[in-house]
Amino acid sequence: MSENPFQIFVRTYTGFAQCIQTHLSRFIAPQEHQPSKKHPSLFSIQSKSTLSKDSIQLKESPSDPFPLAEGQSARPLSKEELGRATWTLLHTLAAQFPDHPTRQQKRDAKELMAIMSRLYPCKECADHFKEVLKASPVQAGSQAEFSQWLCHVHNVVNRSLGKVMFPCQRVDARWGKLECKDRACDLQGITTNFSK
Ligand code: FAD
């Protein structure tokens, strides 16, 4: 049985989070690239380390692969943090959308946005996004079309929140594909060979 769009969304989100976690762990302790036996991708987060940007000390807890920053307790995300993380996922997804998507990929993009408008964990945002989608239906005929459409709807949300409008001609400069060796993260679309 094929996966439904929500499963694809969850899988994409999980992969994306793991990728960021891996890069973050390298950033935290570049000298300690010794994979742990239990959690190979989380090795350097397990040791006492310092985030150079914010000087956040991580607690030393060799048995806990998910330590909290010193002085922090587990807390829910704010609406703003969730929004930034979600836009990061969506714009990166759009940057990586195939130039020639399959019919299924076009359907998935539409379904993903419809699901967002129903399940996004901020009811006010989800309800507003439903209205935005009604006024600006998803356009996912190509990578360029999808990323421009997403920029447009993000701007609709920006405007409603009194934020500055983002110049959509700069969307490719702001958001790009994931840095994956040998383009291993690229999605496959329809390959069209125009040369005979
Ligand atoms: P964000 O808007 O989160 O943007 C992150 C980064 O994206 C920016 O720093 C900028 O570099 C870039 N960017 C900004 N605009 C664009 C664009 N148009 N195209 C490409 N890149 C851009 N919050 C509410 O309070 N009420 C709502 O109704 C609401 N609805 C939301 C609906 C959705 C679907 C999502 C994902 C989020 C929603 N949010 C809502 C959260 C809100 O949009 C912001 O994410 C949050 O306020 C944090 O804003 P920010 O200024 O940090 O930047």
Image: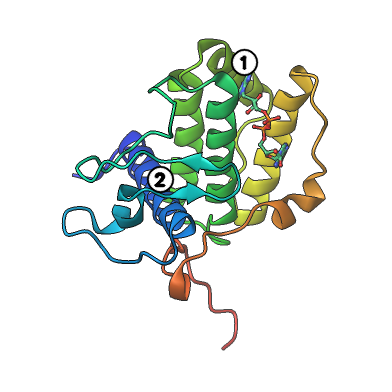
Q: Position of residue 106 (x, y in %)?
A: 49, 46
Looking at the image, residue 33 sits to the left or right of residue 170; the answer is left
Considering only vertical position in the picture, is 75 above or below 140?
above
Disc number for residue 89:
none
Residue type (three-letter) at the residue carrying disc 1: His
Binning the other alpha carbons within 10 Å of mark 2 as few (below 14), some (14 to 19) or many (20 upward) gives: some
Indicate the secondary structure of the residue bearing disc 1. Answer: helix
Residue wearing tag 1: 128
Looking at the image, residue 184 sits to the left or right of residue 125; the answer is left
Residue wearing tag 2: 17
Q: Position of residue 167 (x, y in %)?
A: 82, 43
The structure residue drawn at horizontal position 59% and vertical position 37%, both measured from the top left corner, is 87
Considering only vertical position in the picture, is 170 above or below 74?
below
Q: Nearer the viewer, mark 1 or mark 2?
A: 2
Q: Is mark 1 within 8 Å of ligand 1?
A: yes
Screen quadrant of the N terminus: top left
Q: Quadrant of ligand 1?
A: top right
